Image (spheres, rainbow, N blue to C red):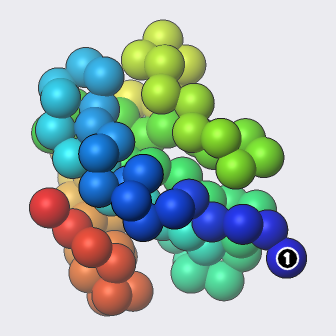
Amino acid sequence: MRAVLASDLLEILVCPKSKQPLVYFPKGEAGDDEKAEFLLCPASRLRYRIDDGVAVLLVDEAQELAPDEVSRLVDRAKALGLQVP
């Protein structure tokens, strides 16, 4: 079983572009795959990957999302009971 990002780390992590809080999807968008974990910044519309438990918070390597995709992911996070800033 993979380790998830520590909650105390999540409290201080912010998007390097916008300096806004991130939404952590510990089991991916579907909520059932620990290998699909990622971080989302709704403010900058960036999705950051997590490689082997390490958040890759590099703006140049983040995936930029369309506004409607960000809204859908925020709604999905809420439905999964994830903490949304």
The percent coordinates of residue 10 (x first, y second) are 38, 55
Q: Residue at position x 79%, y 68% from top?
A: 2
Q: Does the rendering let one see residue 41? A: no
What x and y, as percent, mark residue 75? 25, 74
14 versus 23 height, above or below: above
Look at the numbered disc 1 and give the secondary structure of its residue: loop
In the rendered view, does 18 fall on the left or right side of 53? left
Q: Quadrant of the N terminus?
A: bottom right
Mark 1 neighbour class, 10 Å CA radius: few under 14, some 14 to 19, many 20 or more:
few
Q: Would you name the residue on which mark 1 appears?
A: 1
> What percent of the width, then of the height, locates residue 22?
30, 49
The answer to whether residue 48 is above or below residue 11 is above
Q: Quadrant of residue 4?
A: bottom right
**Residue at x 48%, y 27% (from the top left corner):** 57
Q: Is residue 59 left or right of residue 78?
A: right
Occupied quadrant, residue 79: bottom left
- Judging depth in this view, the residue of 56 and 79 nearest the camera is 56
Left or right, 58 with respect to 40, comes to: right
